[in-house]
Amino acid sequence: MERATFLDAFPLWTLFPITLVIGLMAVEIGSRVARRRGQRARDKTEAPPAPILAGTLGLLAFLLAFTFGMAASRFEERKQNVLAESNAINTSYLRAAMLPQPMSTNSRNMLREYVDLRLAGVQPGQYAQAVAKSEELQQRLWAEAVAAGQKEKSPMTSIFMQSLNDVIGLHQKRIMAAVYNRVPAAIWIGLYVLLFLAMAVVGYYDGMSGTRHSLAVFAMVLAFSAVLALIADLDRPGQGLLEVNQKSMLDLRKSMSASLGLER
């Protein structure tokens, strides 16, 4: 079910070392090219590489900032979707109490199960199964709402169906945000190509000086690799260290359990 980009073939934890190796390799290639050119053309002059280096690094920093902003805004969208969905489920749960029996009890039980599925879906490897079961529960909930409307036509039934429709709509919105609304593969390709070119220019500039690679060059590659890994973490929900807080859904499940105890 998950939409894959070319980076998804690599586990998230491998992206940082892979990016670091690519950056250091580019520095070494640029440095060797500079040394060879220096040996072959000692009496010739060429344009100073400093302005080119500054422009390339500036362009890389700009693209990183743009991509980070894109990934961060989608991460924030996923957070807002969790809050909106928990509120919509809670509204449906409260309104289900006004349905005729046994539709009321059945609907409230299914909504409690629905919340459990939403929480299970954030666990690694459980997303696709949780979504499939959630969609099955949506159909059963809608069937209960239709049955309640046929049994007793009242404004409360229509209101419950409206809130249930909001739950279903937010489910689709969460899928879009988690699966399809990702950083495009073209941007990832552009980032890695630009990273390689920028680090090659850094290595070339370093090689022109005739000295060994400084610690500052390694720190620069390390910093860019860390930012790229952080963007990838933001772009892969349910896989990395940066996870959307599920507190609103947990609080909802707690309140549902408390109401179930009161009903009994």
Image (cartoon, helix red, strand yellow):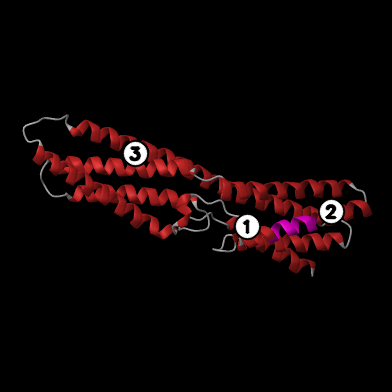
Task: Single out the mark in the foreground, 1 or 3.
Answer: 3
Q: Is residue 180 above or below residue 18?
A: above
Which residue is at 61% across, 51% downward?
82
Instruction: Determine whether label 1 and label 3 are within 8 Å by CB.
Output: no
Which residue is identified by label 3? 61
Mark 3 residue type = Ala
Question: Residue 107: where, in percent of width, then height?
Answer: 80, 59
Give left or right: position of 32 versus 123: left
Residue density around tag 3, few if under 14, some if 14–19, many if 20 or more, within 10 Å? some
Identity of the residue furthest to the left in this view: 43
Q: Residue at x 16, y 43 (%)?
A: 206
Q: Are marks 2 and 3 in contact (CB under 8 Å)?
A: no
**Residue 17, image quadrant:** bottom left
Amino acid on which the number 2 mark rests in the picture: Ala
Q: CA distance from mark 1 to mark 3?
A: 37 Å
Secondary element under disc 3, as helix, strand or loop, is helix
Describe the element under mark 2 as helix, strand or loop: helix
Relative to 4, is 254 above or below?
below
Q: Is residue 12 above or below residue 65?
A: below
Percent position of residue 62, x then y: 37, 36
Q: Nearer the viewer, residue 193 or 135?
A: 193
- Please rate how many residues cluster around mark 1, counting C-alpha atoms within 10 Å: few if below 14, some from 14 to 19, many from 20: many
Give residue 249's mark: 1
User: Which quadrant of the rendered structure holds the N terminus?
Assistant: bottom right
Q: Residue 84: x percent and y percent?
A: 64, 48
Judging depth in this view, the residue of 86 and 260 nearest the camera is 86
Neighbours of disc 2 within 10 Å: few (<14), some (14-19), many (20+): many
Which numbered mark, 2 or 3, is in the foreground of this view?
3
Q: How many numbered marks appear?
A: 3
Task: Please report the bounds of the magenta region as a residue range.
Answer: 133-141
Q: Which quadrant does the C terminus fall into?
A: bottom right
